[in-house]
Image (tube, rainbow, N blue to C red):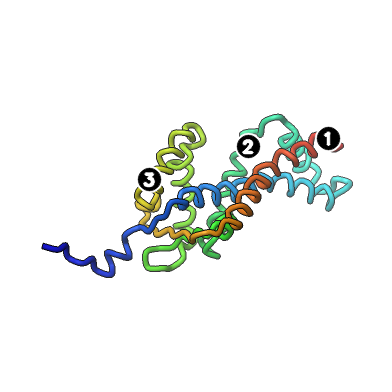
Amino acid sequence: MSEPALTDSAQKARPVRYDGQAWARFLARSLDAGLLSALPYLVWFALEQANPGGGLAARPLLWLRAALQSPGWSPALAAALLIAAIIMESLLLGGLGTTPGKVLFGVRVRRRDGRRLGLGLAARRFVQVVVSGYGLFVASVITLIVSYNAVATRGEAAWDRRLDLEVSCARLSFLRWIAGVIAVLAAQLAPAVLWAIAITSG
């Protein structure tokens, strides 16, 4: 006896996966994280150029300079960057429907009905990525391996399943993979280069 055919809704609900999907999602997130990590340095350099004599920005500049020139980021700066990440992810993914990394690696995140996430749901998703995907940056190795296996085998991550979201990934050409990897490496190296510039600047 043959198995009954799946209904259209059931077929739509079943996650679609391919071999490179987990890597595409990981690299897209890595690119976005690298760009975000470079943001404080870019803000500092912009303030320096806009306020050569200090002015109203003198005190924020002194704090930002001290934080960025230290070997490790201060807790306050790390917290500020995390808040900025939540805001930016919410605006980009919730409002525009994508992020730079997701555009490059062909990743698309939508509600099951095809609508964009909206600011609130995008913020909730980012928080769950930090908790479940990165283990609050304490148990990242373990949680990343678990998340990779979930996406590679089932086609969806735990947070997308909990929030009832659908993530699709376009199949990329070899040249686009190469361009994406180069972009990720550049984005990950950018904060280190900017830090070196920061500690050598007056």
Query: Left of 83 or right of it: where is 53?
Result: right
Q: Residues within 10 Å of mark 1 (few under 14, many from 20)?
A: few
Whether residue 202 is visible, yes or no, is yes
User: Distance between the Cα atoms at labels 1 and 3?
Assistant: 44 Å
Q: Which mark is residue 76?
A: 2
Q: Residue at x 66, y 47 (%)?
A: 187
Circle nearer the viewer, 1 or 3: 3
x and y percent of residue 20 in the render?
Answer: 47, 51
Name which residue type carries label 2: Ala
> Which residue is more in the foreground, 157 or 176?
176
User: In the current view of this chain or complex, which residue is farthest to the bottom?
Assistant: 8
Residue annotated with mark 1: 200
Under mark 3, the amino acid is: Ala
Q: Which residue is mark 3?
A: 150
Mark 1–mark 3 contact, CB under 8 Å?
A: no
Residues marked 2 and 3 touching at CB (< 8 Å): no
Quadrant of the image occupied by residue 103: bottom right
Q: Position of residue 135 (x, y in %)?
A: 46, 37
Q: Residues within 10 Å of mark 3 (few under 14, many from 20)?
A: some
Q: Please, is residue 1 above or below residue 57 in the view?
A: below
Marks 2 and 1 in Cβ contact (< 8 Å): no
In this picture, residue 9 sits left or right of residue 28: left
